[in-house]
Amino acid sequence: MISHHDKQKVTNILVTNLSGYDNGKTSDEHIHFCPFCHHHKKKLNINVENQSWHCWVCDAKGRSIYFLLRKLNVSKSELTVIKNIYGTDVSKFNTDSKEEKSQLFLPKEFHNLSKPTIGFKPLFKHAKVYLKNRGLTDEDIIKYNIGYCEEGLYRGRIIIPSYSESGELNYFIARTFFDNEDYKYKNPPVSKDIIALGNHINWNYPITLVEGIFDAIAVKRNVIPLFGKFIPKELMDAIFVNKVKHINILLDEDAQEQALRYTDYFRKQGISVTNIKPSDKDPSEMGFKTINQIIKTSKESTYEDIISQKINSL
């Protein structure tokens, strides 16, 4: 058991980082708004004595307050206080742990766009039109389980989930379909050290690396979006563990420095690489037929190609 004084310290930290505290009947039980599903009612229960926490809406749960707070990116000083109180072994809660990555859920307001709506849904048509304008088909919607939110934190946003090789949700993209939004993307605050769209990958065939989710959907075949310019550690490890024989790198113009570094690195590791020079259009703008024809006809990058591209970029 922890002392009343320590419970008050924990309470203060929780109240600082989570809204909606209500201790109910006992000082051990806390009730907060859930930071994962953002339900409009207080549904996240936390017990400061045994450290268990559970959201009764999205089913996010755990057995360590330290772990919960680390997911919320609280200050190091606050984490140190929690560690000292509970004697938490920090090594058990590193940012690459499977436990941390498993605690991700689609927004509770998520509605799959391949399913008919019940009642009046004013944003449903907007979402469908947006995807059509981006070149996505009904088959794409079904394949990638694409949906949208009618309300809540992700209202007016297309939701594109990413699943691991085992089928677990490891990330999702939330892209607005309104022109007047300040932020195009509002993605979950979780680690991007993942293999995006891993459930669609066959490691026995060449893989293609792109930056964005819409680029990946345009390529369709054995493609992994990086959600940026850099290859995550988990993906890098998987490339070698699965003995990938060929990689196509298809990054934007402003990421060519990184693309050339990866091309050079993989070649030195015995993996053939094709670094495809970007055009004035993104893969998502070119569409499936055009971009796959480019991938098919592009030649494997040689040492001379790498040097030539580096010189031309100076």
Image (cartoon, helix red, strand yellow):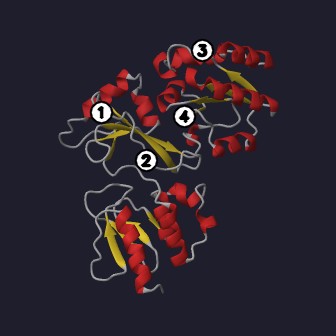
Q: Residue at x 46, y 75 (%)?
A: 51
**First reached walking from the N terminus: tag 2 or tag 1:** 1
The residue singled out by tag 2 in the image is 188
Disc 1 vs disc 4: Cβ atoms closer than 8 Å?
Answer: no
Q: Dot 1: within a 10 Å radius of its alpha carbon, few (fewer than 14), some, or many (20 or more) residues? A: few
Q: In this view, does 49 lie to the left or right of 305?
A: left
Q: Which residue is drawn at 46% across and 79% down?
A: 50
Report x, y in % for residue 80.
Answer: 53, 69
The residue singled out by tag 4 in the image is 228
Q: Is residue 107 left or right of residue 103?
A: left
Disc 2 vs disc 1: Cβ atoms closer than 8 Å?
Answer: no
Q: Dot 4: within a 10 Å radius of its alpha carbon, few (fewer than 14), some, or many (20 or more) residues? A: some
Q: Nearer the viewer, mark 3 or mark 2?
A: 2
Q: What residue type is labelled 4?
A: Gly
Q: Residue 181 carries which label?
A: 1
Q: Which of marks 3 and 4 is in front?
A: 4
The residue singled out by tag 3 in the image is 293
* CA distance for labels 1 and 4: 21 Å
Q: Which amino acid does label 3 sit on?
A: Gln
Q: Which amino acid does label 1 sit on?
A: Glu
Disc 3 vs disc 1: Cβ atoms closer than 8 Å?
Answer: no
Q: Which residue is drawn at 41% across and 26% down?
A: 137
* CA distance for labels 3 and 2: 34 Å
* CA distance for labels 2 and 1: 17 Å
